[in-house]
Amino acid sequence: MISKNNIKSKGTMKKIILSMAMLAMVGATATAQENNDGLTPSRPLTSGELFQGMSRAIPMGRVVLPYGLDVTFDKTVHLIFPSAIRYVDLGSQNIIAGKAEDAENVLRVKAAVKDFETETNMSVICEDGSFYAFNVKYADEPEKLSVEMKDFLSPIEGRLPSNRADIYFKELGNESPVLVKLMMQTIYQNDKRYIKHIGAQMFGMKFLLRGLYAHNGLLYFHTRIDNMTNMPYSVDFVTFKVVDKKVVKRTAIQERVLQPLRAYHQAMYVKGKHTECSVFALEQFSLSEDKQLEVTLYEHNGGRTLTFYVEPQDLLLAQKIDNLKLKW
């Protein structure tokens, strides 16, 4: 026969076991929180962080901070970028944007809907690889109708501003457009001539190759135009062609046109008694013994055409870009 004291003892024992189990569960939960590896934040998640499965919050240092931009229905806001615009994305149909005619680096923005209430956004990518983000809202009278966006290769405090982005384009291969522009800028500013045997001289003009550089699948041609006359020279265009060495009459089959991928400070007008330098970036190539590179300068509405040739052995003179001290 079971006594009341035994029943009380068993009841007490059950309570003790249940309490210990609850304490163990609480301890396990606390340990799990302490061992959190950062995949799930310990604080309550906001609506923007609620994802199915494990996810890691994006650090603030990885976020490109957007600019604030006011637009209106009856006026146009103009954004002037440091290089040609490559891509534009609009967050909603409440705004419209388009490149200005004959101005590749100017973007026109205005409201498509009058008095729209919901803030939207806009993103812009330029040819130099720079990325710009904007938060856009409606304003009856925007204070800033013409905005010049800062070139992040211009002298600033520190190294590079927050809008720096390593955006790559297919034609540049594995090279960042930011670095390509920086290299071309450095070559131009150094203005050193180590190639002294390649050039053309006619009509009181000189068209010279001052330097040749190679880096990461690209060739950089540093050229110079000397106008020794009093008559200004208006540049039409410059061509790069791989041609046969010994051909009396050249045909389209016997020449291959190379398109420059980038040009820095491309001279379009040379005053009398003045000089102008330019830097062209081309995809790296080689020449067989029976080929040569033909570089031709054409005058706009004129006949002063100058051509120089680069031989296969001349390409071997290309200097490593690492030898230059890049100027941030």
Image (cartoon, rainbow, N blue to C red):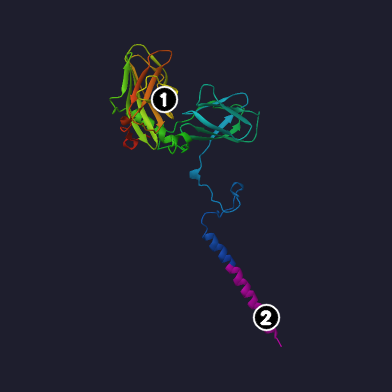
Where is residue 150 drawn, in percent x and y? 46, 31
* Circle 2 Cα neighbour tier, 10 Å, few/some/many (<14 / 14–19 / ≥20): few
Mark number, residue 71:
none
Residue shown at 51%/29% (left/top)? 85
Dividing the picture into quadrants, the one containing residue 240 is top left
Residue 126 at x, y percent in the picture: 49, 32
Q: Nearer the viewer, mark 2 or mark 1?
A: 1
At 50% across and 45% down in the image, what residue appears?
60
> Residue 163, image x and y in percent?
48, 36
Q: Amino acid at mark 1?
A: Gln
Q: Is residue 215 magenta?
A: no
Secondary-structure class at tag 1: helix
Label 1 neighbour load within 10 Å: few <14, some 14-19, many 20+: few
Q: Can residue 129 be seen here?
A: no
Q: Nearer the viewer, residue 239 or 270?
A: 239
Amino acid type at circle 2 is Lys
Q: Locate the N terminus and report the quarter of the image it occupies.
A: bottom right
For the record, the magenta segment spans 1-24
Task: Give the structural element (helix, strand or loop) at label 2.
Answer: helix
Q: Is residue 311 left or right of residue 39?
A: left
In the picture as drawn, the residue positioned furthest to the right comes out as 1
Residue position marked by numbered label 1 in the rendering: 254
Q: Residue furthest bottom?
A: 1
> What residue is shown with label 2?
8
Relative to the observer, which residue lies in front, 231 or 15?
231
Whether residue 214 can be seen here: yes
Determine the main secondary structure of the stretch shown in magenta: helix
The quarter in which the C terminus is drawn is top left
